[in-house]
Image (cartoon, rainbow, N blue to C red):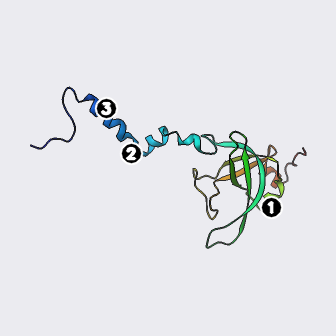
Amino acid sequence: NMGSGKPRGINAGRKLRVKRRLNKWADKGYKKANSGTTWKKPFAGSSHAAGIIVEKVGVEAKQPNSAVRKCVRVQLKKNNKRITAYVPRDGGMSFCDENDEVLVSGFGRSGHAVGDLPGVRFKIIKVCSTSLLALWLRKKEKPMK
């Protein structure tokens, strides 16, 4: 009769406990919750982050598309990390100036780039504490500093 593969008996408790502890890390959900890598990401676990526009950049779209997508480099306030964020809407870039304070959120794919934008994982929501959509719809004026 072959063994069952797991230790049995009155003194097997530690062996089973250690084995379970090590094998838990093979579970993706457990690993994500307990590895602590969330804190190393730019937003450090939060949904939005405030930052300052460092420069405006044009990101070239991936094949088969051909375009220069308007993006900005943002330095986050909470940890000084620099990220590239997409500026949505046609002409949205005209509301973004360097050294403006912006509110940045994720792009909707939980840390993955979206569409034909290589490596851009965030988007701009507010500029100078005014919604970019409100500015674009001419509902609000951008406040002068």
Q: What type is the residue that disc 1 sits on? A: Gly
**Which quadrant of the figure contains the N terminus?**
top left
| Picture residue at 70% right of the left edge, 54% below the top | 85
- The residue furthest right is 144
**Of the numbered discs in the image, which one, if any, rests on residue 26?**
2
**Of the numbered discs in the image, which one, if any, rests on residue 91?**
1
**Label 1 element class:** loop
Front residue of 121/73: it is 73
Residue 59 percent location from the top left of the image = 70, 63
Q: What type is the residue that disc 3 sits on? A: Arg
| Picture residue at 62% right of the left edge, 58% below the top | 119
Foreground mark, 1 or 2? Answer: 2
Badge 3 density bin: few <14, some 14–19, many ≥20, Cα 10 Å: few
As drawn, 134 above or below 3 = below
* Sequence-earlier tag: 2 or 3: 3
**Which quadrant of the figure contains the C terminus?**
top right
Q: CA distance from mark 2 to mark 3?
A: 15 Å
Q: Quadrant for residue 93, please give it.
A: bottom right
**Of the numbered discs in the image, which one, if any, rests on residue 6?**
none
Q: What type is the residue that disc 2 sits on? A: Ala
Badge 2 density bin: few <14, some 14–19, many ≥20, Cα 10 Å: few
Residue 79 percent location from the top left of the image = 68, 40
| Picture residue at 84% right of the left edge, 50% below the top | 139
**Label 2 element class:** helix
Residue 30 percent location from the top left of the image = 44, 40
Badge 1 density bin: few <14, some 14–19, many ≥20, Cα 10 Å: few
| Picture residue at 58% right of the left edge, 40% below the top | 39
* Sequence-earlier tag: 1 or 2: 2
**Label 3 element class:** helix
As drawn, 4 above or below 82 = above
Residue hosting label 3: 17
